[in-house]
Image (spheres, rainbow, N blue to C red):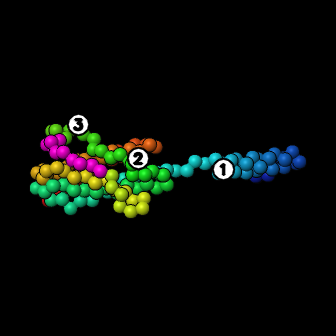
Amino acid sequence: MRVSIAAVLPVGLFGRYVMSLNKKICQWMLLLLMGFGSPVFAVGLGELETEALLGQVFKGQIPIHLGNANVNQDELKASLVRLADQAARGNSHYRYKVDVVKQADRHYHIQITSQRPIAEPYLDLRVQLSWPGGLLTRDYTVLMD
């Protein structure tokens, strides 16, 4: 059995009115959604960059991607979150200094520095970045030669 499109669509004056009404409703909905859309303020963390070697003080940098977020350096707070299994792995006894540093206009990074040389071949770090509009946590594993 063949069904044509003409059989499905409303026919006549009333059908044309309904079709034009649906088109107008769709246009108004589109305008409404475009006018009241909220901007995206995405904040992200880049890859951890380090040149630290085994037996040296660890120094690493993580770029902060602010996107459209209107955040200044004083509002960005970075810290390391202690992992539950760090004590078993042996790297829970290291102390780190964590700072948010401004590189250039609206370019920030997190600076992580250990207070003494690292003796383990790898580190697990959970970095937490907070600002007035949210909170972001990311895990990093560092392998050192």
Work out whether residue 34 can be spotted: yes
Pick the front one: 81 or 142: 81
The answer to which of marks 2 and 1 sits earlier in the sequence is: 1
User: Callout 2, which amino acid?
Assistant: Glu
The residue at the far right in this view is: 13
Q: Position of residue 114 (x, y in %)?
A: 19, 50
Q: Height in image: 65 above or below 131?
A: below
Q: Position of residue 140 (x, y in %)?
A: 27, 50
Pick the front one: 65 or 87: 65
User: Callout 1, which amino acid?
Assistant: Gly
Within 10 Å of disc 1 (Cα), the crowding (few <14, some 14-19, many 20+) is few
Question: Can you tell which quarter of the image residue 136 is in?
Answer: top left
Q: Which residues are magenta?
A: 90-99
Label 1: which residue? Answer: 35
Total count of labels: 3
User: Callout 3, which amino acid?
Assistant: Ala
Label 2: which residue? Answer: 75
User: How far is the residue under mark 3 from the one under mark 1?
Assistant: 46 Å
Nearer the viewer's eye, disc 3 or disc 1? Answer: 1
Q: Are marks 3 and 2 in contact (CB under 8 Å)?
A: no
Q: Which mark is residue 84?
A: 3
User: How far is the residue under mark 2 from the one under mark 1?
Assistant: 30 Å
Quadrant of the drawing holding the C terminus: bottom left
The answer to which of marks 3 and 2 sits earlier in the sequence is: 2
Q: Residue at x 20, y 38 (%)?
A: 85
Mark 1 residue element: helix
- Secondary structure mostly seen in magenta is loop
